[in-house]
Image (cartoon, rainbow, N blue to C red):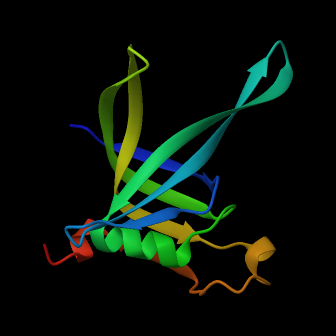
Amino acid sequence: MNKVILAGRVGQDPTFKLLANENSVANFSVATTEFKNVNGEKQTHTEWHNIAAWKKLANFVNDYLKKGDQVLVEGRLKYDTYEKDGVKKYKTSIVAHQVKAFWDKKNEADTAPKKDNVDFSEDDLPF
């Protein structure tokens, strides 16, 4: 089974593209933070994850998410390879199947559309 569940904060406003075949994709990053105790000291470690949402889920991401929002993302890992300047490169990303957005008090004054907590998944898609 290839399944990933992440809870974190959106690192940048999503970038949205409408593709030629009438599909759409939204790309965004999510920061997750671990708190580690090393030698009795608290330390934080942040990992950054690249997320891709497709079709109607991309529209949801574009309409509702912005930098700093708390999200829960469920999806699958995707590994890609490409060549740049003659060097083989590797990229790991997450293809989102479900995105749940949470708003906290720091976002209350913002003008983005608000609902208490918004949940959208591929199960809601007609295809």
Q: Residue at x 40, y 30 (%)?
A: 91
Question: Which of the 4 quarters of the picture holds residue 66?
Answer: bottom right
Percent across and percent down for residue 25 are: 36, 62
Percent across and percent down for residue 33 are: 67, 39
Percent across and percent down for residue 56 are: 31, 74
Question: Which of the 4 quarters of the picture holds residue 26?
Answer: bottom left
Near-viewer residue (117 or 81): 81
Q: Residue at x 37, y 59 (%)?
A: 53
Question: With respect to residue 34, does 15 lie above or below?
Answer: below
Asked whether, in this view, residue 120 is left or right of residue 69, the answer is left
Q: Residue at x 15, y 78 (%)?
A: 126
Asked whether, in this view, residue 17 is left or right of residue 108, the answer is left
Name the outermost residue toward the left. Answer: 127
Q: Residue at x 30, y 42 (%)?
A: 3
Near-viewer residue (79 or 71): 79
The quadrant of the image that shows the C terminus is bottom left
Question: With respect to residue 49, does 102 lie above or below?
Answer: below
Report how many numbered discs are placed on residues in the image: 0
Asked whether, in this view, residue 14 is left or right of residue 68, the answer is left
Name the outermost residue toward the front. Answer: 85
The quadrant of the image that shows the N terminus is top left
Question: With respect to residue 38, does 48 lie above or below?
Answer: below
Question: With respect to residue 45, does 55 lie above or below?
Answer: below
Percent across and percent down for residue 88 are: 36, 16
